[in-house]
Image (spheres, grey):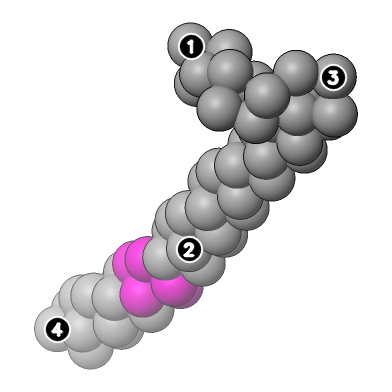
Amino acid sequence: MSTLMRQEVELAKAEAKQSATRAGKGAGMLAGAGIGGHFVLLFLSLALMWALGAIMPLGWSALIVAV
């Protein structure tokens, strides 16, 4: 009976480790996607500011995009 319990505990540890590894990878990928999304938003805002700057002063276009 003791061997069976030991084997079950070892199996539970292995499954928990595998689950934690998957969760860690998922969290890392989610963080990377969030950072990528912020960069996309930043560069789209800059592009819009420069596009508006072609038809009005750059300071006003920056203010419009910021608000």
Residues at discs 1 and 4 in contact (Cβ within 8 Å):
no
Residue at x 75%, y 18% (from the top left corner): 56
Q: Which mark is residue 55?
A: 3
Residue at x 65%, y 30% (from the top left corner): 58
Cα distance, mark 1 to mark 4? 68 Å
- Helix, strand or loop at label 4? It is helix
Q: Which mark is residue 22?
A: none
In front here: 55 or 19? 55
At label 4, the amino acid type is Ser
Outermost left residue: 2
At label 1, counting other C-alpha atoms closer than 10 Å, the crowd grade (few under 14, some 14-19, many 20 or more) is few
At label 3, the amino acid type is Ile
Q: Quadrant of residue 54?
A: top right
The residue singled out by tag 2 in the image is 28
The residue singled out by tag 4 in the image is 2
Residue at x 55%, y 59% (from the top left corner): 32
- Helix, strand or loop at label 3? It is loop
| Above or below, 4 relative to 34 | below
